[in-house]
Amino acid sequence: MTLVGRLRHVQIEGPRVRIRGLEKADLSNTFAWRNDERSLRWFKNATPLQWESHVNWYDKYQASDATGCMFFVESSEGSPVGQSSIYNVDGDSAEVGRFLSQPELRGAGLFREALLLTLYAAFDLAHLKRVHLEVIENNDRAVRLYKSVGFETTGTTDGLLQMDLTAGRFGPIRDALPFAITTQGSL
């Protein structure tokens, strides 16, 4: 199991949200969020998921060699907020994404905190040097969010922006956070 894969066994907390490994009990939330019409338009594949394929995907993820980690995001009180992940690990680089959030909570700043916790996991716990993502070019809200935590645009292909963040660019952003990050569990 890689260091990123072992992140499945930790919980990382900020003041308003925490991230932890995705569990089967979380699938009803992720399924509903992914199929919500307010979410579908922001995916490369906007076809609604079928429940059986969603569960099969999760079972394969759980049985995998654990090179990536799917996080479930909860409020500090335990209410569902969203999902994030670190995957496609290649040496000291990985992709971040598979972002989902509960549509009714968008714009409240909760997912920004969850993204910061995910990046902390990638850089500070898994010791990655670089993460990257793709986002639909006209998803202005997401692009602003990613830029606010240090991502830079590196290219555009077929309506998708490629964005990149290095540990060096994230360090000052993490150091300037107005809150502490705590970690429970072991790698």
Image (tube, grey):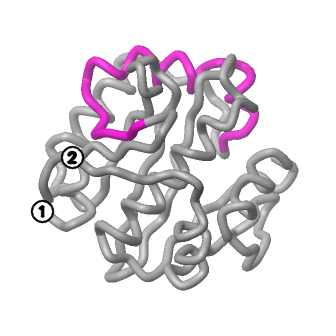
**Type of amino acid at the residue the image marks with label 1:** Met
Quadrant position of residue 94: bottom left
Q: Are marks 1 and 2 in contact (CB under 8 Å)?
A: no
Select label 1 or label 2 by which is in front: 2
**Type of amino acid at the residue the image marks with label 2:** Gln
* In the image, residue 42 lies in the stretch drawn in magenta: yes
- Residue carrying label 1: 1
Q: Earlier in the sequence, mark 1 or mark 2?
A: 1
Q: Which residues are magenta?
A: 18-43
Name the main secondary structure of what is drawn in magenta: helix
Question: Residue at left 20%, top 67%?
Answer: 3
Badge 1 crowding class, 10 Å Cα cut-off, few under 14, some 14 to 19, many 20 or more, is: few
- Residue carrying label 2: 184
Label ID, residue 162: none
* In the image, residue 50 lies in the stretch drawn in magenta: no
Q: Nearer the viewer, residue 27 or 74?
A: 74
Question: Residue at left 40%, top 71%?
Answer: 123
Question: Residue at left 75%, top 60%?
Answer: 160
Rendered position, 178 above or below 174? above
Rendered position, 11 above or below 130? above
